[in-house]
Image (cartoon, grey):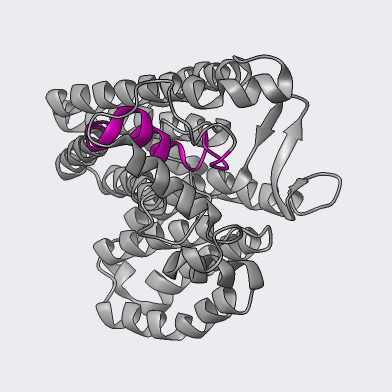
Amino acid sequence: MQRARFNLFAVSIILICIGLVMIYSVSSIHAWERYKDSFYFFKRHLSFLVVGAILAFFAMSIDYRDLRKFARPLLFFAVVLLILVLIPGVGREVSGARRWFRFKFFSFQPSELAGMCLIIYLADFIARKGKVIKDLSRGLLPPLSVLGVCTLLILMQPDLGTALSISIVVLIMLFVAGIRPFYFLSLGLASLPILYALIFRVAYRRARVLAFLNPWLDPQGGGFQIIQSQIALGSGGLLGLGLGHSKQKLFYLPAAHTDFIFSIIGEELGLLGTLGVIALFMIFILQGLKIIKNTTDRFGYFLSLGLVLMISLKAVINIGVSCGLLPTKGLPLPFISYGGTSLVLDMISVGMLLNISRSGEYS
């Protein structure tokens, strides 16, 4: 376990360092154009990194089992924040979406926190219920009800990508806990009409799916981002154009330092650079699985499972979107993309995983 803990820590540090380098490389020109400070985004990301490091150290130093006492209060707090962010004048609206709290130079996205609080709550719920978790009324319906409330509030922001990713993590945790496959099959069939309505009855989501299927039908509209992302990846070739030499970051590729930073990595560092990043995430997942396997208590097992799933899923979706393998969704690349809430919570997750990994050594 000590080796798995060291490897997880080392991979996380390497990914964070890659993020620091790429955020400056990608955002410096945009930052100068908008704020007359080429280090604007870099300095903000560095401040988030300091906050994340402090909170990760705190998460690593406490007894993670004490989180069980706060599982329900934390979830209630997250739900309250999800409600408050929808109130005009309290939550900040950007491009028709109300997803952030803004305090002068600091912004916070409560849906990210809700995902972590839901994982803590569900890990505690599964640990408390034991074999009763397999029962429909006592084991499946309570967490599904809580998930339904959280996803509904997130969908009202609206943020379908985060709602789906949280739902997938929760359902996988419940499946591993022993919920009968028949229940999941029934739930999946029942949710298909809802998913259809959420995607194809909403104009901008339908446009995203159509752009994903054939971005060249609307190269200047819905397909623009996907096309520019693929141009960036293709332009890099094997070795890339060189660090800092991206052309797509020159106001061609929107959200280059956030959702599409992987594309710029491909352009500047080439295929080898992108494969290196993918390999690092694969090592992270492998070490996370080792920690999960060797965790001695049920709460720690499912808490670590949920945390590894959340980080892994965000990485898979972000890379898939950048490569044109998935429809566009606003999920950052863990540890690398610019984004305060995501980076801080990812670092807290690593702190918790390092904490949990010690349980197998001393029990």
Which corner quadrant holds the N terminus? top left
- x 41%, y 46%: residue: 231
Between 338 and 74, the residue placed more toward the observer is 338
Q: Is residue 325 left or right of residue 68?
A: left
- x 55%, y 18%: residue: 42
Q: Position of residue 134 (x, y in %)?
A: 29, 72
Between 102 and 350, the residue placed more toward the observer is 102
- x 67%, y 14%: residue: 37
Q: Position of residue 340 (x, y in %)?
A: 56, 30
For the stretch drawn in magenta, the main secondary structure is helix
Q: Position of residue 227 (x, y in %)?
A: 46, 53
Res 118 seen here = no
Q: Position of residue 299 (x, y in %)?
A: 32, 46
Q: Is residue 85 left or right of residue 11?
A: right
Between 207 and 70, the residue placed more toward the observer is 207
Q: How many marks?
A: 0
In the image, the segment drawn in magenta is: 252-276
Q: Which of the 4 quarters of the picture holds residue 6? A: top left
Between 11 and 328, the residue placed more toward the observer is 328
Q: Which of the 4 quarters of the picture holds residue 294? A: top left
Which corner quadrant holds the C terminus? top left
Say above or below: 117 vs 148: above
Res 162 seen here = yes
Residue 284 is a magenta residue = no
